[in-house]
Image (spheres, grey):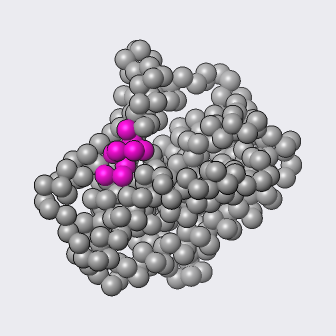
């Protein structure tokens, strides 16, 4: 593997380790973790997304953006269908979690730092487009996994999600050739640059509160981790090869699907009465194992 790739990924996980240590030392408490989450979702990530659209207009980029949006829809429909097969043998509460974990990766907090480190702003540009269907499916199919019915109130909130709004605003400006003044763009770029370190510190601090002995004894969590970290990216690769996708679109898509389980899994499991403990274990184990699987995915690509 390219030494630069190893260096980029190592830096990310070292920053995660700083977050873990800070939580263990008591320098970061639960309230701080919640604050980090709000700052990331509402300020840092939207700024990063807007700044990622600061490119000269290109018909090829617009075409690629349209294609990766379509690819994302197709990939997630396929994953939703196959998730039922991988989860069928478990009890009802565990089945909900396994299906969710199989389909939804940590596309926001983990994918952007990794892809940004490997591909720069052009990678984040395509990742932002790929993630639009993820958010839509997450708040439709994802909630249906847990409830068996649609939560119309949640569906209405999708378009007002800061990351979705930032993506639409950024892509709209890019498509119309609108350039923000340098002072504003530099502001978005600077604030957006906080996303990577804050994301990894947030994840590390969140993992520090988990009880190690209980986490690593659950076989179902390992099974779900396998479907998330191995099966999902392989299926993504196969689907996009069948469509003869552009190389960078294929690589960005596969890497997003190679990310750990989505951080919302335990939140939704708790809200809708599923196996919250299993969901938390899946997030923890997939994040730890991704230290190995993400470099393997990059090497494979």
Q: Is residue 10 visible?
A: no
Q: Who's the residue at 84% across and 52% down the image?
A: 88
Q: Is residue 138 magenta?
A: no
- The secondary structure making up most of the magenta span is helix
Residue range of the region highlighted in magenta in the rendering: 39-47
Q: Nearer the viewer, residue 174 or 66?
A: 174
Could you say where residue 291 lies in the image, as x and y percent from the top left?
48, 43
User: Is 46 covered by the magenta stretch?
Assistant: yes
Question: Residue drawn 63% across and 65% down?
Answer: 76
The image quarter containing residue 61 is: bottom left
Percent of width and height locating residue 229? 59, 51
Residue 266 on image: x %, y %: 64, 37
Residue lying farthest to the top in this orientation: 26
The answer to which quarter of the image holds residue 169 is bottom left
In the depicted structure, whether residue 46 falls above or below residue 174: above
> Picture quarter containing residue 84?
bottom right
On the question of residue 244 being in view, the answer is yes
101 displayed left or right of 165: right
* 80 displayed left or right of 31: right
């Amino acid at each position: 593997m390219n030494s630069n790739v190893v260096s980029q990924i190592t830096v990310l996980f070292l920053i995660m380790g700083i977050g873990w240590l800070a939580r263990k030392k008591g320098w970061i408490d639960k309230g701080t973790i919640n604050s980090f989450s709000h700052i990331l979702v509402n300020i840092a990530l939207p700024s990063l997304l807007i700044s990622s659209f600061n490119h000269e207009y290109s018909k090829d980029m617009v075409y690629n953006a349209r294609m990766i949006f379509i690819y994302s829809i197709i990939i997630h429909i396929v994953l939703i269908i196959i998730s039922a097969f991988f989860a069928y043998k478990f009890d009802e509460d565990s089945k909900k979690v396994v299906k969710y974990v199989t389909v939804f990766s940590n596309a926001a907090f983990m994918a952007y730092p990794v892809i940004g480190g490997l591909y720069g702003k052009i990678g984040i540009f395509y990742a932002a487009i790929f993630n639009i269907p993820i958010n839509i499916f997450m708040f439709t199919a994802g909630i249906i996994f847990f409830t068996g019915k649609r939560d119309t109130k949640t569906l209405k909130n999708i378009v007002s999600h800061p990351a979705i709004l930032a993506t639409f605003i950024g892509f709209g400006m890019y498509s119309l050739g609108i350039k923000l003044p340098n002072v504003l763009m530099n502001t978005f770029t600077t604030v957006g640059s906080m996303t990577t370190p804050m994301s990894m510190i947030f994840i590390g601090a969140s993992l520090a509160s988990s009880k190690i002995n209980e986490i690593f004894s659950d076989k179902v969590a390992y099974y779900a981790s396998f479907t998330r970290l191995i099966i999902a990216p392989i299926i993504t690769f196969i689907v996009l090869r069948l469509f003869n996708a552009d190389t960078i679109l294929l690589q960005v898509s596969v890497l997003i699907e190679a990310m750990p389980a989505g951080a919302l899994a335990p939140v939704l499991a708790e809200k809708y009465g599923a196996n919250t403990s299993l969901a938390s274990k899946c997030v923890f184990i997939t994040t730890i194992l991704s230290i190995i699987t993400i470099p393997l995915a990059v090497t494979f690509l």
